[in-house]
Image: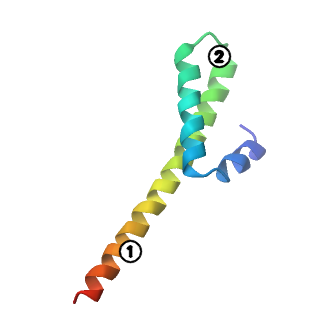
Amino acid sequence: MTDSDLAEIAGFGYERARDELVSVVKMLEQGGMDLDDALALWERGEALANRCEEHLAGARRRVEDALTRRDTDNE
């Protein structure tokens, strides 16, 4: 995986990263590719999964912050 691939994925929104990850998983499950191609696809899938996790972690923080503000406002 090149730096430009990682930079591209870093710009993906959650839905795009998730959709491409689903596609990568399907391609890996189908098999029929040589080992180098499969490893490259696996690495892309890992990067996409990490990007999805970044978005989800950010969403969790936003929800937690909102709940904290709500609790503080109710005191």
**What kind of residue is marked 2?**
Leu
Residue 35's disc is: 2
Residue 67 to residue 33: above or below: below
Labels 2 & 1 near each other (Cβ < 8 A):
no
Q: Nearer the viewer, residue 66 or 1?
A: 66
- Dividing the picture into quadrants, the one containing residue 39 is top right
For the point 32% across and 78% down, the residue is: 68
Compared across the picture, whether 1 is left or right of 65 comes to: right
**What kind of residue is marked 1?**
Asp
Q: Nearer the viewer, mark 2 or mark 1?
A: 1
Compared across the picture, whether 33 is left or right of 26 comes to: right
Find residue 12 and report its horizontal and vertical position in percent.
Answer: 64, 50
Q: Residues within 10 Å of mark 1 (few under 14, many from 20)?
A: few
The CA distance from mark 2 to mark 1 is: 45 Å
Find residue 26 and report its horizontal and vertical position in percent.
Answer: 54, 23
Residue at mark 1:
65
Q: Secondary structure at mark 1?
A: helix
Q: Residues within 10 Å of mark 2 (few under 14, many from 20)?
A: few
For the point 40% across and 62% down, the residue is: 60
Furthest toward the top, the residue is: 32
Residue 52 to residue 59: above or below: above
Q: Nearer the viewer, residue 36 or 14?
A: 14
